[in-house]
Image (cartoon, coloured by chain):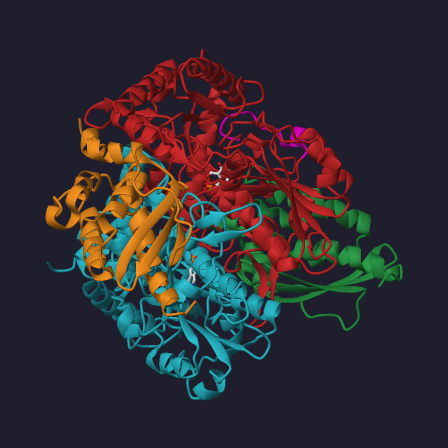
Chain colours: A red, B cyan, C green, D orange
Amino acid sequence: MSFSAAQIRKDFPIFERTVCEGKRLVYLDNGATSQKPLSVIESESDFYRLHNAAVHRGAHQLAEEATDAYEGAREIVAAFLGAPGGADEIIFTKSATESLNLLAYAMGNAPVGNRFAVGAGDRIVVTEMEHHANLIPWQQLTARTGAELAWFKVTAESRLDLSTINDVITANTKIVSVTHQSNVLGTINPLAAIVARAHEVGAVVILDACQSVPHMSIDIKALGVDFLAFSGHKALGPTGIGVLWGHMDLLNELPPFLFGGSMIENVTMTTATWAPVPQKFEAGVPNMAQAVGLGAALNYLTNLGMDNVHAYEVALTGYLLEKMHAVPDLRIVGPANTQSRGGTLSFTIKGIHPHDIGQYLDSQGVAVRTGHHCAWPLARALSIPASTRASLYLYNDESDCDALVDAILGAQKYFGRF
Amino acid sequence: MSFSAAQIRKDFPIFERTVCEGKRLVYLDNGATSQKPLSVIESESDFYRLHNAAVHRGAHQLAEEATDAYEGAREIVAAFLGAPGGADEIIFTKSATESLNLLAYAMGNAPVGNRFAVGAGDRIVVTEMEHHANLIPWQQLTARTGAELAWFKVTAESRLDLSTINDVITANTKIVSVTHQSNVLGTINPLAAIVARAHEVGAVVILDACQSVPHMSIDIKALGVDFLAFSGHKALGPTGIGVLWGHMDLLNELPPFLFGGSMIENVTMTTATWAPVPQKFEAGVPNMAQAVGLGAALNYLTNLGMDNVHAYEVALTGYLLEKMHAVPDLRIVGPANTQSRGGTLSFTIKGIHPHDIGQYLDSQGVAVRTGHHCAWPLARALSIPASTRASLYLYNDESDCDALVDAILGAQKYFGRF
Amino acid sequence: MELDSLYQEVILDHYKHPQHKGLSPTFSAQVTHVNTSCGDEIILNINLDNELISELTWEGQGCSISQASVSMMTDLLTGKTLKQAAVIVKSFSELMASKGTSAGDPLVLEDAVVFAGVSKFPGRVKCSLLGWMAFKDAAIQAQANNRGER
Amino acid sequence: MELDSLYQEVILDHYKHPQHKGLSPTFSAQVTHVNTSCGDEIILNINLDNELISELTWEGQGCSISQASVSMMTDLLTGKTLKQAAVIVKSFSELMASKGTSAGDPLVLEDAVVFAGVSKFPGRVKCSLLGWMAFKDAAIQAQANNRGER
Ligand SMILES: Cc1ncc(COP(=O)(O)O)c(C=O)c1O
Ligand SMILES: Cc1ncc(COP(=O)(O)O)c(C=O)c1O
């Protein structure tokens, strides 16, 4: 099967509608959230129509069917990521944001002696290109515990500066949390050196895989990281579902985060003990229909083949980069070619503010994002308070890239009137 | 319009299916989760089909439509609860469990001087009939801070023992968190005295309204509480959506819980400040489709009229109680009549374990729950390690109650063989 | 009726007339296991005579399946060596994981093959295993205790 | 073209040729306001002569709408009393909340009535109000400072 974005687009009901009075929808805001294929929409509604019940709780047929569907989704996620310990290593959260906060709070709950206990004298390492979701939870953990925060800087070539790696990941470093792919620059970070150094000093490595899981094949064993987080909604899945993966031995030692039903072993008025992983981390009636929908989304991606998806997106990115290089007064914020970069293209246009560019693009049916993209420290480091971001996905094609570039040229003409 | 459960049932696609080889589905596990009307299922899928985009972020038409839908749901929830400060007082979470943990963690984040700061010498009050979700977060907060936990006991009549109220809610009490309606006993707790005493000593009152919001009309002003939590999935809404309501002045003072995108005002590598309420409490791309679905669910309930729903359920509960009283060897765990009680009926049958009852009922198409119902301390206090729970909702009718009682009699015959 | 494959006579018989119920005053190890989803509880005492399981006694409350299972188990394992017991436990665990596809080995499991019917009911597999998981745990602890590792 | 109701000539003109831009060396109060969703920033200096706004100057970066709006605002409010300014601010806020249903009062808002077109674009209302919110804040602080409450 050859890869056909036009064919794929037919699976996504939203492309049947138009925007801005009859214009074709050119959706290039995939870094924010992806559109959903019919199979995902229907798997969520079929759950409600046919099997809806509280998992793990009821003594009846519906509850068993719901449990099978929910636990089946866990198997799908585990297989998709290549989780070495299987489905029990997959924890469902509401979003990557919750997954990362879960880690920071759970580590904050660790008693002295627990390997995750963080205190004064310990270091937590991030990078300058983190999304706020992988920065502020660690800022807060250091503020609560007295640990210090350190970070890798970003070079003029939009790459992590690993030249000082031994000074950043020091012997007292406990946690290294980095993004796999920047949601602004598109940069795909090299992990091998970071993982090696972190493990050398006994630190755990957390991967924010929000922008990589939807776009490339992930093999956890090959990556060598200890924890991984992503959101379903950026990977063709429903809103309201996220994933945290961790090595079973680490999840066993990690204290719980949310407390309530289904995560307990035994409860008295004053004490409680915890169920085994993953239940330990899933308090309450879970987001069942959304987990099932995520399973359908990952199945959709697996059917296409993640290597095919990635190859297609890289080729399309190359096409768009070339077209953009030809636009006068346009500056790409991120790597200039497709080497170790994904299909997230941020840019600025001399003399026109990103918000105005975005507005003009919208009037042409082209959906992008503008601003600091929830990575404000990066924007400051680059002295680019705001940029415009076009982010590609599997249903985009060259005609979408053409529409974007035409609209940029149109904007230059429109705002150049004066 | 007269209230017709048979008519209502037609709005719920799941009742078109059968269970256990062709048996009619008698769904009496509403305390765990409710079924969903078509309008809810479709509002969620229509969001994906027509308006899906990240709210508050994109510079394009879809993002504006998505924002309108999401913020519209907030308005619906505010109106449904009678939130005195309007929509900005409504915070979307993934579940009541998250809402209650949010409060416990956010209070744990409060610096000295903040009115929510909890420490040694302070007291937190709950009741013996709390669901684990409204018990363990407070156990953990006391463990982290050195505060003490105290609780109201439950009387032989399944009511809160308020005779010692001044000894339970002491001058040093900071938080009183109680359930509105027990998910085991069906007891509806009287709040006036608790609220008055709590406010007298300067404590805030948190209401776990999981089992009341779906079943009766709620007027926050009349209740006088300070915070309120419930889950969408028990109120005809989607899974993966919960609500926290709080008074605006309290929400303003409460520190945030989850950290990440969209909840910030300003961010540097080492510091962050917060956006206004409610954004301050909604980090990340939210569970948008689920919020929209919850809006549709509350609209469905409002169209029926919550007072009608409640009156209908009380009458049905009376019918079922009477039938149950006539079953030999059956003991109701909870109030014996419909005074201040909802349609949650737990019971035990002499000589047959609840799990076996539940299994037999399932074979007859009757879906109930068995066990400790996530209220293990209550089960211990009552010396009833497990019970069977039938919980009614608006689509149930007398034929469902008859089916339940027939099945109980059948179980007695079946297990009485030996 | 499908239910009958779950509630077979021998199961209900053990439920009504449990074997080895009532805890021995002394033991090599004592464990308490709980089914966290329903609150069912088993306390199991094991007495080890070197490698021989000389006595297994229990107390508990729970559904017919969990109680009958532990009753049958104590019948089966008393008088066996730890090695023999391990073979039986493994065979029973495999049977319970079979989702109704296995009939169980009557040479190993004797009466307990009736649990083949239970294995069709995923919601009851945990009940069936409660006592057996307690035994596994108790055996390990008893060996440790007997080696003086307490 | 609908876009033209947003980007009217007078708006783009103020954007290209901003008024009162460049901060005064002294001030009664200085405030910095940020649009948290896009990072746009305005620093506003206010000089109060008793009740009279004697000078309003600013610095900032942002989109045409936010920059034009603050430019027009400083034009409008300079030389007014705080009371007169409050009336104008209220009128502008109401216009921006009108979702395109109001034309704005030219007697109060003068040129700034062109923002009626912007009010149709919910995503840009925040941009329009950035400078005005800064002014509200600055006026309060300046009064406090002048009363020596700093
Ligand atoms: C009284 C009560 N509180 C809290 C909860 C927790 O709700 P959820 O599991 O939806 O978070 C429940 C339901 O499970 C409940 O019945
Ligand atoms: C790199 C990265 N990390 C974290 C997040 C947060 O994901 P969510 O908002 O779905 O929780 C995002 C997306 O917003 C992202 O792009």
- State whether residue B49 appears in this view: yes
Q: In terms of image quadrants, where is residue B274?
A: bottom left
Residue B205: x percent and y percent? 40, 73
Residue occupying the point 48% across, 75% down: B128
Query: Between C145 and A384, which is closer to the camera in this rendering?
Result: A384
Q: In terms of image quadrants, where is residue A364?
A: top left
Residue A100 on the magenta span: no
Count how many numbered circles sit on residues in the image. 0
Give the residues drawn in magenta, as a range.
A213-224
- State whether residue B19 appears in this view: no
Residue C99: x percent and y percent? 55, 40
Q: Main secondary structure of the magenta part?
A: loop
Considering the image in quadrants, where does the N terminus of chain B appear?
Answer: bottom left
Residue occupying the point 41% across, 20% down: A329
Residue B284 vs residue C21: left or right?
A: left
Residue A216 vs residue A177: left or right?
A: left
Query: Between B114 and D18, which is closer to the camera in this rendering?
Result: D18
Residue C143: x percent and y percent? 83, 57
Name the quadrant where ligand 1 sits. Answer: bottom left
Query: Between C73 and C133, which is closer to the camera in this rendering?
Result: C133
Query: Between A146 and D62, which is closer to the camera in this rendering?
Result: D62
Residue B401 vs residue A152: left or right?
A: left
Residue B352: x percent and y percent? 48, 65
